[in-house]
Amino acid sequence: MKRIIATTSVLLLLGGCSWGQNSNIDTKKVSPHQDSNTSGETKQSQVTSKPDLLLESKYFNHIKVVNGQNLIENRSNILALVNKEYSLGAYEPKDLVRPNVNFSFGNQDIEKSYMRKEAAAALEKMFKKAEKDGIILYASSGYRSYKRQKALQDAEIAKVGKEKAVQAVATPGQSEHQTGLAMDITGKSENFLLTENFGKQKEGIWLREHAHEFGFILRYPKEKEKITGYEYEPWHFRYVGTKVASIIYKNNWTLEEYFQEVKKM
């Protein structure tokens, strides 16, 4: 797969989903395995005084450094923070199911049509509510295995060389799709493609305004590229549960920013 830049701004996914992401994560903002806050005493007291910003330790990344790489040990954690700094390794979820929703590729029973059970159930509810509101959504790409990501990266290395390939394709283990908690969503308005313009269409607008009600967040928002490490992807939604999704939505945060603010209970 390739990232295609044209007048239609079509973006095909591979990493977070997209290609050519040269943004770097500010590592000071990505410390899910630490409970310290570097924003000063005033902000610290504000955070600890809010019950919604207290989180059990099990939901923070538990990190083990292996060969210089930060590997997440509690990989089935529903709030696992996966990005260019934190890797899942060769993890494969054990509870993958195929949600009963519309798919852009029809009824094909293929890897990317799967999600973890809890996320799949939430996706079904979200799609049904959208339909009641006159919005027809289509799932495009969910789970992507470590093996599949490696094959994609290897193919790109063979084609353009390692230096260029690593800038275009996510390193295996660092794609959020591997969690089984993410789904790329599209609609007829964009001919079932994954485009930046999707965010301006009725489907993209509905998702941005209502996804949190079902536990999903817009994972790579506009103007947050330096925080997430990925460009704006209005089609990529990640399941984190309704409580956390609502907090993130209300504060206009990314998942990285959420972990910067919460404190361990």
Image (cartoon, rainbow, N blue to C red):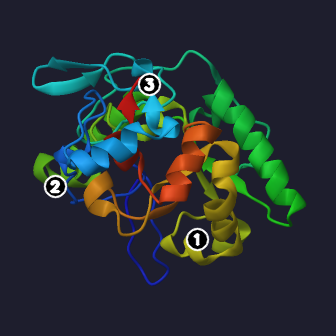
Q: Is residue 96 above or below residue 154?
A: above
Q: Which mark is residue 198?
A: 1
Q: Residue at x 80, y 65 (%)?
A: 135
Of residue 78 and residue 112, the one placed in the foreground of this image is 78
Pointer 3 and pointer 2: residues touching (CB < 8 Å)? no
Confirm whether residue 244 shows in the render.
yes
Dot 2: element: helix
Residue type at mark 3? Tyr
Of residue 256 and residue 265, the one placed in the foreground of this image is 265
Q: Which residue is mark 2?
A: 164
How many residues crowd mark 1 within 10 Å: few (<14), some (14–19), many (20+)? Answer: many
Pointer 1 and pointer 3: residues touching (CB < 8 Å)? no
Left or right side of 69 for 124: right
Residue type at mark 2? Lys
Quarter of the rendering containing residue 150: top left
Left or right side of 200 for 86: left
Of residue 156 and residue 33, the one placed in the foreground of this image is 33
Query: Residue 27, how many percent across, how many down?
Result: 18, 45
How many residues crowd mark 2 within 10 Å: few (<14), some (14–19), many (20+)? Answer: few
Of residue 254 and residue 23, the one placed in the foreground of this image is 254
Q: Which residue is mark 3?
A: 59
- Give whichever of discs 3 and 2 has the lower sequence position: 3
- How far separated are the C-alphas under marks 2 and 1? 28 Å
Pointer 2 and pointer 1: residues touching (CB < 8 Å)? no
Dot 1: element: helix
Quarter of the rendering containing residue 263: top left
The C terminus lies in which quarter of the figure?
top left
Dot 3: element: helix
Query: Residue 182, how many percent across, how many down?
Result: 54, 41
Q: Residue at x 65, y 63 (%)?
A: 209
